[in-house]
Image (cartoon, rainbow, N blue to C red):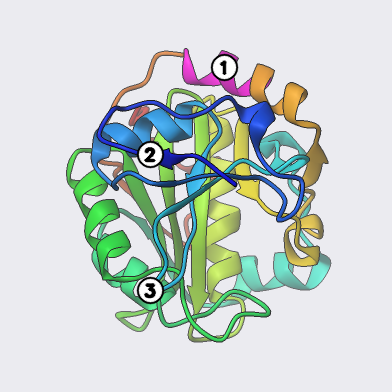
Amino acid sequence: MIPWLGDTLVFPPLETALAEPNGLLAAGGDLSPARLLLAYRQGIFPWFSLGEPILWWSPDPRMVLFPAELKVARSLAKTLRHKPYEIRFDSAFRAVIEACAQCPRPGQDGTWIVRDVIEAYCRLHELGWAHSAECWMEGELVGGLYGVAIGGMFYGESMFANRPDASKLAFVHLVRWLQTQGFGMLDCQMRTAHLARFGARELPRPAFLAELARLTSQAGGAAKWHYRRNNATPLEHAHEPSQR
């Protein structure tokens, strides 16, 4: 059995999370900005399917990417240099999350990004906590991802691509930009071979939580991110003030 959350903004201790399924901690509660931000600060995230109650998770180990450890395959590096595209942040958040809702996670038939989730994260975006990284080609949004930023921590949630490599292009630009802005870790939640190829690795829960506490205590509040780059303006040559 797992605890059922009421109206009080509190989560059970993480050590009470189940080992199978890995990290299931609690059910119920709501998706208010206050509860979501509290959850992320504690290393907890919501993940549930249509018709289920809200389920809260904190898996052990945790898949993370340290921006300085980003790996880019040779073929993708070539695409980054030569393919015509534009990367924008926070210019079409709702379109990104709705596109992600059309892309089930591997091994799933449906999506966990139900209408309540879309509206909850759009609200977080309006408040300056949730962000999108978008890949545009010929004026069309063709890929991207979204997540939540607190202090020096970024929590990745989901990505989509309607053209080859589109989400990867947005992801690489985002990770490189996060490093320039002083972000120390990107939470990838669950292990996937796809993220491992980018350099993501697993951390035991105690190590993850220690780094999480350090990074979320850093300065950097809610704000819209302003970023717009095409492949004719490499990131290392771009000069833009911090958006944190």
Q: How far apart are marks 2 and 1 (CA)?
A: 23 Å
Query: Predominant secondary structure in magenta?
Result: helix
| Highlighted magenta segment, given as a residue range | 211-217
Q: Does the magenta stretch include residue 102?
A: no
| Residue at numbered disc 3 | 51
**Left-right relation of 202 to 156:** right
| Residue at numbered disc 1 | 213
Badge 3: few (under 14), some or many (20 or more) residues near its Cα, within 10 Å?
A: few
Q: In this view, does 149 lie above or below 73?
A: above
Please report contact status of discs 2 and 1: CB closer than 8 Å, yes or no: no
Q: Which of marks 3 and 1 is in front?
A: 3
Q: Is mark 2 on a helix, strand or loop?
A: strand
| Residue at numbered disc 2 | 5
Which of disc 1 and disc 2 is earlier in sequence? 2
User: What residue is at 54 percent from the left and 31 percent from the top?
Assistant: 180
Q: In which quarter of the image is the C terminus?
A: top left
Q: What element carries label 1?
A: helix
Badge 2: few (under 14), some or many (20 or more) residues near its Cα, within 10 Å?
A: some
